[in-house]
Each structure stands twice: as structure tokens, then as C-alpha cells.
Image (cartoon, helix red, strand yellow):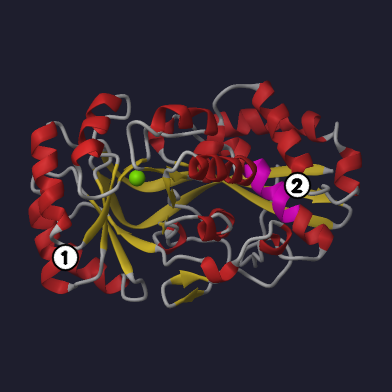
Amino acid sequence: MRLLFRPILLELCHPFRLATGSRTHTNAMLTEIHFEGFVGYGEAAMPPYYGENHETAGAFLKRVASVLDKFPESLSQGLGTGSSIQIIISELDALAPGNHAAKASVDIALHDLWGKMEGRPLWQLLSIEPDKMPPTSFTLGIDEPAMLRQKMLEAADFQIIKIKLGSEDDRQIIRTIRENSDKPIYADANQGWKNREEALDLVQWLAEQNVLLIEQPFQKDDLDSAAWLTARSPLPIIADESFQRLADLDHMANCFHGVNIKLMKCTGISEGFRAAHAAKAKGLQLMVGCMTETSCGILAAALLAPLCDFADIDGCWLIRNNPFEMPVLENGKLRLSEEPGLGLKSTSVASGK
Ligand code: MG
């Protein structure tokens, strides 16, 4: 078995401005696991605010081969029911803390490999019901009205607009959208709101503008303010930066209405599913999100979407240099492929190192 990986800079179609900063590229690592003539594809997408980059991911992935070599039997048995993958990811967790996206790149590649060895799409192996796929939103970064209007044209195939807030004038951004579209909106403040009362005023106004949810209003560690707003908000308040992994869920139920699960935060599909089921058991609403990612990460995240109330899995529509074919979008919903594994088709051959 061979693990190959190569760094790639994902070029964003537009500079992406959030409350926390602006960027034009996202660091990513593309992984491949080769075994018995099959190849599983994975991806680590690493926006700057989570501390991973090409160097950290490369250093971590160099250590992963020794872990994979311990599991040749489960691999030759087709990775069992997927529980073997969970055991492997637990071993990766024991290798080093953090490195969540790098771990996810291994988890996703193992899942894709599993599906290909079984000759079945992953959604079938994981008992996912494709007809429960929610529509995905299309994300617009913070921008001037003229650029927002242009970006909205790019959102034409999507039923829902996600807009980044936490700007100097959030109401103006929403007014600009509403002058051009009556599509429902997901609003993401990315920790950008500072004042509880002002936030509540804004949320009440947003509720009148057909905004359906608010992501991450305050700093990620300010759970008291999140709980204060959640207790009063007419809209669901969803944790994103405050929520990374399954173990964080205990803190979430009292502070938020729901959580945004992202594979790059929670080490991949295995833990993503466990987190989704655990969050539902706690009565939390569920969103599945993404970074700016290739089709690989997006199709992996799409497996979780039918379990979720909200999906924001548009990352591959926001980049120029996706090395895979785009997923199929039908009425604003991702279609899960009938092909084995994730159903990825490469448009450029990955070279390992
Ligand atoms: Mg977010």
C-alpha cells in the first residue's frame, strides 16, 4: 500500500473576504492511497485560520505510512464496514494532536478506496438516502455592491445564498442582495460581531429579510455571548468556529441551536457521521459545511448532507483549478454519483512524492 500526497494551491475565483481577513488562495494537499490496483483519493483543505499548511500536512502525512502498514489485513478485506477506517483514524489521532485536515485527507482516501474495492458508491455502503439531499447554498464573501451583484449571477444555479457578514455595514450587504434576489439566505458572521444587543437587533432584522440561520456570531471562545443570543434569537444560531470535533459537542447544546460539521475540522467522514448522530441525539440542528475545496472534499461532505438540515458544500464552485470534474448539481442539490467510491473523475493526473 502506498500513500502519495502533493501540495496544491487552490486559486479562488474571487478574493474571499470574511470578517477575519481576505485571501486569494487556499492551501490544500491531495492524497492518494494505492492498494491492489485501486486508488482512493483524499484531500486536506487548509484555510489559514486553523493553523495547518503544506509543511504541517506534509510532515504529518510522512508519518502516516507506518500506521497504514499495520492494517494490511483490513484493507485486503475491503475495509470491512468502514469501522476499520475509524480504527485507523484513531491511530492517526494518537500520532499527533491537531492536523485535522491532514487526517481527513487520509480518511477520505480510505473511504474512496473502500468503495472502489467493493465496486459500490459510498453512499450505498454508508446507507445514505440520496433523496434526502438538501439544497446547498452558494457563498458570497464580503464585497462592494457592484461585485456582490456580479457574484449573484454566479449563484444562479443555487436555491440558497450564503452571505458573509461581520462587515462595517451588514444591513447594506443584505439590502444589496434583496434588491437583486428573493432567495433565502444563510448569514455567517465568522466571529465578527462584538456586541450582544446590536447582534440581537440585527438578527431580528435579518429574520424579516428571509435569512434562515446565523453562523458563528461571536468569537469562538465566547460561548456565554452565543448562549445569550441563542436564548433570544428568532433564527437558529449555528456553531462553526466554536465547534471542531465530536468531543466539543458537550459544550454546544447549551450555547447554540446547531452545529456546522466540516470534514476538515473533524478529521473526515468517520467522525463526521459520529458527530452528526451524536448532535441529533442532543437535539441540535445540523449543517454540513466545507472550506474552498476540490470536488474530492465536496463529494465526501455530500455524503453527510442527507442527514443535515442545512448544506453549504459549494467549495469547488469557488475555485478555478479543481483537478477533478465538477459534481453534478440538480435543482441546487448535489447528486451522489452511481460510480464506486466517491465517484470522482480526475481531470489532471496527481503525481505523488
Ligand atoms: Mg462558517
- How packed mark 2 is, by other alpha carbons closer than 10 Å (few <14, some 14-19, many 20 or more), is some
Residue 297, image x and y in percent?
A: 55, 53
Please name the residue that numbered disc 2 is placed on: 82
Closer mark to the observer between disc 1 and disc 2: 2
Along the horizontal axis of the image, is 121 left or right of 119? Answer: left
Question: Left or right: where does residue 274 sit relative to residue 142?
Answer: right
Q: Which residue is mark 1?
A: 177
Quarter of the image where the C terminus is located: top right
Q: What residue is rendered at 63% in x and 28% in y? A: 59
From what the image shows, is residue 294 above or below residue 263? below
- Residue 338: name its quadrant: bottom right
Note whether ligand 1 is within 8 Å of mark 1: no
Q: Nearer the viewer, residue 286 or 116?
A: 286
**Residue 139: percent from left, percent from top:** 32, 58
- Residue 241 position within the rendered picture, expressed as x and y whole percent measured from the top left: 37, 35
Which residue is depicted at the point 18% across and 42% down? Answer: 166
Residue at the image point whose x is 42% and y is 40% from the top: 47
Quadrant of ligand 1 in image: top left
On the rendered structure, is 260 left or right of 216?
right
What is the C-alpha distance between the residues marked 1 and 2? 43 Å
Describe residue 322's horizontal placement relative to residue 140 as left or right.
right
What residue is rendered at 72% in x and 28% in y?
91
Regarding residue 146, the answer to whether it shows in the image is no
- The answer to whether residue 75 is seen in the rendering is yes
- Helix, strand, or loop for circle 1? helix
Answer above or below: position of 151 versus 270.
below
Give the magenta part as a residue range.
105-113
